[in-house]
Image (spheres, rainbow, N blue to C red):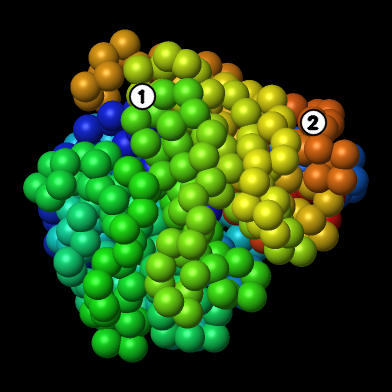
Amino acid sequence: MKKNLQKNNLLVCLALLGSTQIYAEKQGDVVLKKHDSDKRSNQNTVVATINTGVTPSDIAITPNNKFAYVVNSNNFGVEGADTITVIDLKTNLVVATISDPSFSDLSTITIDSRLNRAYVTNGTGTTISVIDLATNQVINTITGFDGPSSMVIVPGTNIAYVSNFGTDTGTGAGTGTTVNVVNLANNTITGAPITVGTGPTALGISRNGNFIYALNYGDGTMGTGTLSVIQRSTNMVISTITGFSGPSAIAITPDGRFAYVTNAGSNDLDPIGNTISIVDLQTNTVVNTIPVGLEPSDVVFSSNGRLAYVSNFNTFFENNTDATGIVAGAGTVTIIDTKTGRVVAPTIEVGQSPTALAIAKDNLYVTNGTSNTVSVIPIKG
């Protein structure tokens, strides 16, 4: 799971709060690119582009594959633009936009099918906003975090894990070193925080739910990123895997044997990351490194696990202290054959600054941070 690439590039996101509201988009939600009924001819091609809010950074699909929830991080501090965009995946139309005073530099979103809730991390704050998916309203906030950056839920339980990247009001941005355990039944942090590496940006969970993987950004320079392996039965780190370079996202293969880690590179673009590390989860060692595009930001797998899709952020900042001077190159998605460990054709061109990826049925959805859109791409299962 992704994320926090925007934090890693030091984009400043102002928390300008508005009243809770939901409204339906009336028109202009989607731009159709093709009308070919033959899905095979459309594979690996953008067939629709959906408008979102300001700087979308993450996306989650409901378990029934009917809706996508897109987090708009609002990196430019536009008043009232800290929002969640809700998309009907049958029509590719925006059907609601969620705003709430609790929203602040929204970072990631995680959906719990058991409770029918969505959990949104407020990246520069100390809280997670809880959304009731039946009403699309914020019904609670969970407090006590330090720049929450990612969340995973243990399947079949009310237990979640949340990484703390660090925030200016806490340990300092990018200097957090902990993961919290959360009881979703009462929306409270439970137990002592688990100490991991510096700047945990993303979390993964093993297929059997026995291990949590905390991806730690470090200082972004070559080889300083780490992966902490947490044993759930004790909530202790049992192994630390080293050698990553500005890691931003982690995904576990469907068979549970490997983790793919994106190496986005350094905050100051020296070096620029352009690889995926493959980790053998039986031995907790890096077994392969695959070159992809510039600044890989997220990775997901096809349903059969045969292909991996990697978004390449490819965006540079003239001033690394704020969100000014953005230079976005062509956004792309790289495809990897997981059996051979090689990149395969085609490279898919999407919007600018692609951040997060999600798959629903036979479609890949890509959030484009600079374009303020979601690209829809039919893919091979």
The location of residue 71, given as percent across then percent down, is 39, 52
Q: Secondary structure at mark 2?
A: strand
237 sits to left or right of 219: right
Which of 81/178 is in front?
A: 178
Image point (61%, 60%), residue name? 89
| Label located before the other in sequence (1 or 2) | 1
Q: Is residue 300 visible?
A: no
Question: Which residue is outermost to the top?
Answer: 318
183 sits to left or right of 25: left
Image point (55%, 79%), residue name? 155
Report how many numbered discs are placed on residues in the image: 2
Which of 14/195 is in front?
A: 195
The location of residue 308, given as percent across then percent down, is 73, 45
Q: Secondary structure at mark 1?
A: loop
Q: CA distance from mark 1 to mark 2?
A: 26 Å
The location of residue 126, given as percent across then percent down, is 18, 59
Query: Dot 2: within a 10 Å radius of its alpha carbon, few (fewer than 14), some, or many (20 or more) residues?
Result: some
Which of 295/228 is in front?
A: 228
In the picture, the disc for residue 343 is 2
- Quarter of the picture containing the C terminus is bottom right
Image point (20%, 55%), residue name? 146
Q: Is residue 291 visible?
A: yes
39 sits to left or right of 61: right
Image point (33%, 88%), residue name? 185
Question: Which residue is outermost to the left?
Answer: 169
The location of residue 323, given as percent across then percent down, is 26, 25
The residue that label 1 is drawn on is 267
Q: Amino acid at mark 2?
A: Val
206, above or below 270, in the image? below
Q: Amino acid at mark 1?
A: Asn
Query: Dot 1: within a 10 Å radius of its alpha carbon, few (fewer than 14), some, or many (20 or more) residues?
Result: many
Which of 205/335 is in front?
A: 205
